[in-house]
Image (cartoon, rainbow, N blue to C red):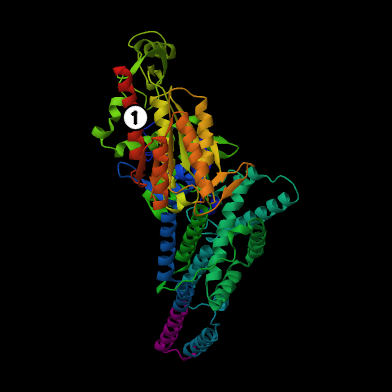
Amino acid sequence: MQYSRYGASMGRANRVQYSRWDGTQVGFDFDATDIFGEITDDLLYHGDINAALRRMMQEGFDSDNGERMKGLREMMDELRNKRRETLESHDLGGIYDEIAKDLRDVVEAEREAIDELAQEARDSGDARRQELTEQVAAERHLSLDLMSQDLAGMVRDLQNHDFTSSEAREKFEELVEKLREQLMQQYVDQMSGAVENMTPEDMARMKDMFAELNNMLEQRQRGEEPDFDGFMEKFGDFFPENPQNLDELLEIMAARMAAAQAMMNSMTPEQRAQLQALSDQLLEDMDLRWQMDQLGQNLAQAFPDLNWNRRYEFSGDEPLNMADANQMLQQLGDLDQLENLLKGAANPGALAEVDLDRARELLGDDAARSLEQMAELSRRLEESGLVENKEGKLELTPRGIRQLGQNALDELFNKLDMDKAGQHEIARIGVGHERDHSTKPYEFGDPFNLDIGRTVRNAIFRSGAGTPVKLTPEDFEVERTEHLVRSSTVLMVDLSLSMPMRGNFLPAKKVTMALHALITSKYPRDYLGLVGFSRSAEELKAEQLPEVSWDFDYGTNMHEGFMIARRLLAKQSGTKQIIMITDGEPTAHVMPNGQIFFDYPTRPETRDATLRQVMLCTKEDIVINTFMLDPNPYLSEFVEKMSQLNGGRAFFTTPENLGDYVLVDFLNNKREMLRGRRAG
């Protein structure tokens, strides 16, 4: 069982419990196959599994059943919209106005009580009583008239005022306690109830809590180990987030104090001065104010990334009282923290730090579910065997490379008209095949020619003797087949800069992966060599294919590509062919001294050198079939000449139908070869 701590700066340090996915839990509908299928094109284009996952995280995707996994960009837009709506709807001035109104209500109630007392004296008919009462009433009215107009001054003057009305005095005392609690709730989670109906003893205990936090920070700075467990035994009720260590505790407290500072920063200078003075007035007792200020300074130094200077521009008309403002500033802080976390998530694992419960409150169920799924992407791909983690970086496994090619092949076959392609006929045993009397574990895409004996034996070895024998896909073993006609192919792919510029690279890369998957799965005895060419040419290995990309250079060196292809095919038997995919005429060749010559447009010496290689291919019975993408007249003229010399065919294709042409041609050739063998 694995536990993942979510960022305490998101407001709460909730924990989420993970367990192995068994298909019953809600919210894990995207499996590794869905994920891998979604990033196939990105992987083919860029060849980087880590970058492909990052881009998928940013964009999100829709599954085949129409289910949507939201992308991070979409979520960040929602966060920004929510922040903007909040700021455009509310006004922090309500904090000042509400307190001032409550204090004026106390003053008004006291004046009414003074006037009632004076009226009672007049109504009594007792002249002496009336004289004394009116004197007291005048003094108390004067005391109220001379009262300071700022909030802190009003509180101080009312604390020194000799109340006539017991109801007004009680109302004032309740207001003071309410204000003190609201001020303290900036530093204590509102869910805890720790500051409700706070007594002087409670205030003293809170001061002790702040003092102990300061002491632990100082101990850590001296290299000592603070007594975290002892602190939680005494003051754990102040922290319903249930931090598990001192770091989590300090993160929680720092986030609270940063939010409190953000509220002060967001006020006008007058509002800020008023509230600061009021806070000093209400919290100056028992040294609480000093301890809080000291803790704020210590935490600001320990957590500088919390942006202690953050402020918000409220521009709405709806006033906020202090309690609502505390809650809203905490929410705005959570919005900021979540946005920053999403913005900085470089891999799916980084999303394990998100507080999913809080994300659900801020963005809704769909977003929280998408975040939960994203955090699991890497793990699910690793468990499927498609990728592996090497020193913190994901890399494709051989199985992943095969699956990538199979995805490309499936996509291309799905586009073909089955009657024309004859793809299903190729997979059938008996036409052009003979038994090889060997078997192999079944892999996706293999003809399902099941070897019953070996399959049952595998199941018995796995689960033991007894009936019934329960088969699983891992038990399946299929018969190998051997083609009576072997062919050897070299695929030459243009990797010059014009390919991506014209949108031709991805279709060419997809065909390369698909043809490799087709030959290795359906024709395992055939040979496929790979050559990439741009300004120069080189042999490509199958394991390199996912990372193969274009060259940031101009030049189309068919000459060197044919040289390498001839060398590769010289070691092979059977029918030999070169399949070349290109979008440009030859503009580079290898000179006798080994240097590369390049010029555009095509120079005669480059053209002649390339055609000499074509003639050598012809003498060696190597057929060259060329697939031209967006051909221009120069390329068309050159390929026509090449076909006359070699006897190979030329196809004029587009990025949309390149795969159809290459695969259909390959399969048709294979079928003709098999028919010719049978006829012989």
Residue depicted at x 37% and y 49%: 366
In the rendered image of this protein, does residue 170 appear above or below residue 296? below
Span highlighted in magenta in the image: 106-128
In reply to whether residue 26 is colored magenta, the answer given is no
List x then y, in percent, for residue 556. Answer: 50, 47
Amino acid type, residue under disc 1 in the picture: Asn
Q: Nearer the viewer, residue 327 or 354?
A: 354
List x then y, in percent, for residue 457. Answer: 40, 10
User: How many marks overall?
Assistant: 1
Give the residue at mark 1: 669
Q: Is residue 544 left or right of residue 623?
A: right
Q: Where is residue 441, by image quadrant?
A: top left
Q: Secondary structure at mark 1?
A: helix
Q: Quadrant of the C terminus?
A: top left
Using the rendered image of the protein, determine whether residue 18 is visible from the camera's viewpoint. Answer: no
Q: Nearer the viewer, residue 90 or 40?
A: 40
Q: Nearer the viewer, residue 220 or 459?
A: 459
In the rendered image of this protein, does residue 435 appear above or below residue 580? above
List x then y, in percent, for residue 546. Answer: 49, 38
Majority secondary structure of magenta residues = helix
**Dot 1, crowdedness within 10 Å: few (<14), some or many (≥20)?**
few
Using the rendered image of the protein, determine whether residue 490 is visible from the camera's viewpoint. Answer: yes
Q: Is residue 630 left or right of residue 47?
A: left
Q: Residue furthest left?
A: 419
List x then y, in percent, for residue 172. Answer: 49, 72
